[in-house]
Amino acid sequence: MLKYAFIVLFLFAGCTSGFEYWDYDYEYEEEFVEIGEAFYWVWHEIKYEKDPENNWKLPHETAILLTGDCEDQSLLFADIVYRYLGRYPILLKIRDGEKFHIVVKVDGVIYDPTNSCIRKDDLDIKEFYTYGRAMFIALVR
């Protein structure tokens, strides 16, 4: 029942970044002042680990465990970009060959922390998630 209350609250709150409806106050040990630092840190520190159930972890869970798949790494990167750099990331679900993949778009640039690359904007985008929506998905898993 509580899970559905979150869904109703989210629908009324809108799909903006507005994650302030939940108490999420994790502080990373690193200090990030540029997007490149955040991108490099996620790529270098977080080891890829496939999740067969495809559950999205909260960013601090990924930072503590130092493992995650594409959505975990992308959500961690988006969280750092939003909270430390004050930018508004959008998570994109794209088709990558036969599979789907999650990347992050910030200021017109697409960052792929899982594959350590910056992509052009000519991707096969299937869905997108605002930062707040992505955090919501991780919360209600």
Image: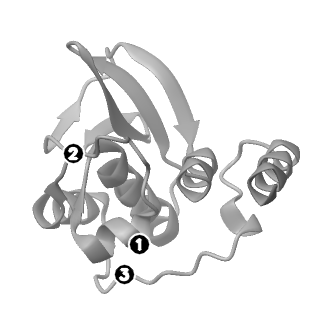
> Nearest the camera: 43 or 1?
1
> Amino acid type of disc 2?
Lys
Q: Position of residue 18 (x, y in %)?
A: 71, 57
| Mark linked to residue 28 | 3
C-alpha span from label 1 to label 3: 8 Å
In percent of the image, x 31 and y 14: which residue is there? 122
Please tell me whether mark 1 or mark 3 is closer to you in this view: 1
Q: Label 3 is placed on what type of residue?
A: Tyr
Instruction: Determine whether the residue tagged by mark 2 lies in a helix, strand or loop.
Output: loop
Residue position for label 1: 60
- First of labels 3, 2 by sequence position: 3
User: In the picture, residue 11 is in which quadrant?
Assistant: top right
Residue mark closest to the camera, 2 vs 1: 2
**Mark 3 closeness class: few <14, some 14–19, many ≥20 residues within 10 Å:** few
Identify the residue position indicated by label 2 in the image.
50
* Residue situated in front as seen by the camera: 29 or 10: 10
Mark 1 touches mark 3? (CB < 8 Å): no
Q: Nearer the viewer, residue 47 or 38?
A: 47
Give the residue at x 31% y 81%: 31
Residue 79 numbered tag: none
Where 41 falls versus 110 (above or below)?
below
Marks 2 and 1, the one that precedes in the sequence: 2
The N terminus is located in which quarter? bottom right
Q: Label 2 to label 1, Cα distance in Å?
A: 18 Å
Label 1 sits on a secondary structure element that is helix
In terms of sequence position, does the residue under pointer 1 or pointer 3 come before the other? 3
Q: Amino acid at mark 1?
A: His
